[in-house]
Amino acid sequence: MTKRPEELALLAEAGRLLASVFGLLDRSSLAGISTLQVNEMVERFIVDDLQARPASKGQYGYGFVLNASVNNVVCHGIPSQSHVLRDGDIVNFDITLEKNGYIADSSKTYLVGEVNPAARKLVQTTYEAMWMGIRAVRPGARLGDIGWAIERHAKRNGYSVVREYCGHGIGREMHEEPQVRHFGKPGTGLALREGMVFTIEPMLNRGRRSVRTMGDGWTVVTRDGSLSAQFEHTVAVTASGVSVLTLRPDEPGRGLISA
């Protein structure tokens, strides 16, 4: 479950490359283009520019390099030529990348054009909740500490936490142990050890936490139609705290947090 120093170095390289994919999206105008066009742009960048592999494509029979989850889609939204992003949308892009046999996983929710204050607050609070969870990571802490920190922040702001999906260990495989829940009680669960690598990826809803899967077998939406947002980073437990392996260009100085 823990990674050797040489493995951590390879994971950090995959994370650095994946962060640059989000840098590409940050520089792109999303309004007026389809989620399939975004998928194709990201695939070209990963394969041609980064000389890496989009790890999601082909995983579990999935045919695309990213998930594009718009508005009330919680996760696993399938890119589509017919789904054009419009002013006022929020959209989460969840992307994985494999380089030299090791995989990094990250997601970010984007505001498309002028987004109403309620949606903007949900996105900001979800981002903050992810960082609350990240700050709970250190040797000797427990998985329940991460979930508790996330859920507490969500509830304080009037949001619910989706429970059906969780963070996960990652390395040579996209999904490894442990499972990292985004709710829980402090002081409970597996004790964290230096060298563990996993994702923290909370999904917060404006309404109830209940979700359902659409007929395509992939797309998960809020049952009550409310907006949902998500952020995700791949992190490593260090001797003194946590290192964020997928730290993005818009997050300067937040990559290493010590206890």
Image (cartoon, rainbow, N blue to C red):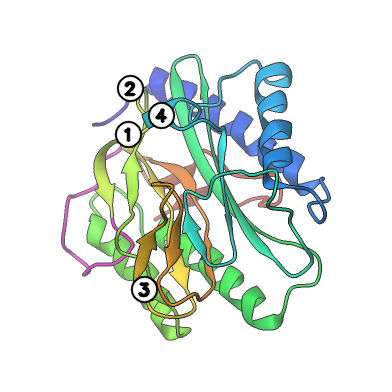
First in sequence: mark 4 vs mark 3: 4
Residue at which label 1 appears:
195
Q: Nearer the viewer, mark 3 or mark 2?
A: 3
First in sequence: mark 2 vs mark 1: 2
Residue at which label 3 appears:
209
Numbered label attached to residue 61 = 4
Q: Nearer the viewer, residue 63 or 196?
A: 63
In the rendered structure, does residue 190 fall within the stretch colored magenta? yes
Q: Are marks 4 and 1 in contact (CB under 8 Å)?
A: no
Q: Are marks 2 and 1 in contact (CB under 8 Å)?
A: yes
Left-right relation of 78 to 163: right
Q: Secondary structure at mark 4?
A: helix
Q: Nearer the viewer, mark 4 or mark 1?
A: 4
Residue positioned most to the front: 215
| Residue drawn at the location 46% of the way across and 52% of the way down | 219
Numbered label attached to residue 4 = 2
Q: Quadrant of residue 204 in the image?
A: bottom left
